[in-house]
Image: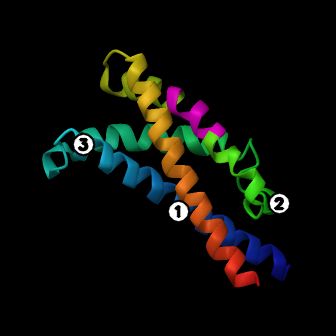
Amino acid sequence: MFERDIMSKKTLYLALGDLLAIFIVTVIGFATHGEAGLAFLPRMAAAFFPVSLAWFILAPALGLFRAENVSEPRQLWRPVLAMIFAAPLAAVLRGLLLNAPIIPIFAVVLASTSAFGMLVWRALYLWVTRGKSS
């Protein structure tokens, strides 16, 4: 029972970190276009929420919250792959939400930047948690 509670905390930290990574990538994406002001919060939300939803649909299916996958450096390909698949789904959801066309290059850029952001976060998580267990 105690070990299960610890695993739940780790999963919560991973999920919150995933959300933070998606948020940071979203803000950076808008900032690179000079659109980081408060007036752009609705458009940021229209990007953040679809990416988050798509991520949390695919991440568990790819084992991204299983202890054996998040504690092994050789498994860092998993979050990258998950985001490469989640981003096009997010682009479609965003297009539907905004009633706007789905631009393929947007999906490609979203996939690559979000995958990189998630890789950085998950590598940082792995580094911090491996340091604590030693």
The amino acid on which the numbered mark 3 sits, given as a three-letter code, is Thr
The residue under label 2 is 68
Q: Residue at x 51, y 26 (%)?
A: 88
**111 sits to left or right of 82:** left
Q: Give the amino acid type for the residue marked by disc 2 in the picture.
A: Glu
The residue drawn where x is 16% and y is 42% is: 34
Q: Categorize mark 3 by other alpha carbons within 10 Å: few (<14), some (14-19), many (20+).
A: few
Q: Which residues are magenta?
A: 81-88
Residue 117 colored magenta? no
Residue 131, percent from left and from top: 68, 80
Query: Which residue of the protein is positioned furthest toward the front in this rendering?
Result: 74
Q: Secondary structure at mark 3?
A: helix
Q: In the rendered picture of this protein, how many numbered marks are placed on residues? A: 3
For label 1, the residue is 17
Distance from Cα at disc 3 to Cα at disc 1: 22 Å
The residue at 81%/73% (across/down) is: 4
Q: What is the secondary structure assignment of the residue under circle 1?
A: helix
**32 lies left or right of 59:** left
> Which residue in the protein does label 3 denote?
32
The amino acid marked with disc number 1 is: Gly
Label 1 near label 2: C-beta < 8 Å? no
